[in-house]
Image (cartoon, rainbow, N blue to C red):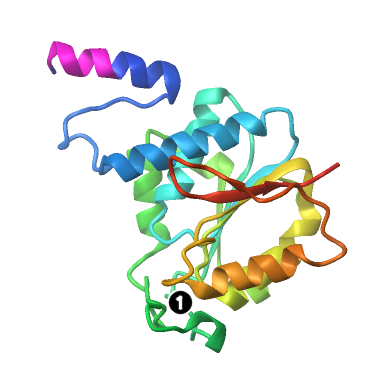
Amino acid sequence: MGAFTRSINRVLGQTVGVQIVPARARRVALGSGWFARLVYFNSLVEKIAAVDGDVVECGVADGSSLASLASLLKVYGQTRQVWGFDSWEGLPTPSDADLGDASIAVSGMFSSASTAKVRDELLAYGLTGQEIAKSVKLVPGLFSETLPGYKGHIALLHVDVDLYQSYSDCLTNLWPHVEGGGIVAFDEYGKDDTWPGARRAVDEFLASASVDASEMRHDESSGKWWIMKNG
């Protein structure tokens, strides 16, 4: 490993707690989008430092986002339970709200994902098997069936579920568990051509009189949107 890479590693280690190593040792794919997302997640994890609760992701797929969040929690010494909810059977049938000329929603999309791939991703991001067993809980099944069973408190909720009904299920079931000062981040919000159902579901939910939250906030580097629960 050359002097340039060592220098970059010093910067990465001091800012976002990651290191570049030879590809044969790690399979995490790096690119501009990966860095932008990691910096975005880093900012969210920093913001919840004083908020009690779990980190919950709905829509885990192969686990790249979940692994990024779990590794950042480790870097910051935030001891939290990390939950991942997904059917790991692909997308359910899209509703009319999810369809349009440029929509990419297809029933069964992402069906190649699995909990085994998520575990591999967590290991690739530097978590040990013991850390995974202790702090990460993966819950397979449809959101409408699994989310009502969640009884914890949430500091950060990352919603990456693509479809209108899935967004509605996640927000309806989990918003009451989000602590004041906690963050809800939306992966597909704003991608109105490809995932039109996401904005519709989020906007409808936030228009509810029972929702007390900040204005929608936009992260310029990643293009993602998020809100903070008041209180």
- 3 is within the stretch colored magenta: yes
Q: Which residues are magenta?
A: 2-8
Image position, residue 44 (x, y; %): 58, 37
Secondary structure beneath dot 1 equals loop
Relative side of 208 to 14, left or right: right
Image position, residue 174 (x, y; %): 73, 60
79 or 134: nearer the eye?
79
Residue drawn at 49 percent across, 84 percent down? 94
Residue drawn at 81 percent across, 67 percent down? 208
Instruction: Write down the residue under mark 1.
Output: 91
Residue drawn at 77 percent across, 47 percent down? 229
Q: Main secondary structure of the magenta part?
A: helix
Image position, residue 101 (x, y; %): 39, 83
Badge 1 density bin: few <14, some 14–19, many ≥20, Cα 10 Å: many
Relative to 186, does residue 37 appear above or below in the rendering?
above
Relative side of 227 to 89, left or right: right
Q: Quadrant of residue 200?
A: bottom right
Q: Quadrant of residue 165?
A: bottom right
Image position, residue 91 (x, y; %): 45, 77
Using the rendered image of the protein, determine whether residue 70 is visible from the camera's viewpoint. Answer: no
Disc 1 residue type (three-letter): Leu
Relative to 231, does residue 142 appear above or below in the rendering?
below
Relative side of 78 to 111, left or right: right
- 115 is within the stretch colored magenta: no
- In what quadrant of the picture does the C terminus appear? top right
Q: Residue furthest left?
A: 2
Using the rendered image of the protein, determine whether residue 106 is visible from the camera's viewpoint. Answer: yes
Relative to 113, does residue 57 appear above or below in the rendering?
above
Residue drawn at 47 percent across, 58 percent down? 60
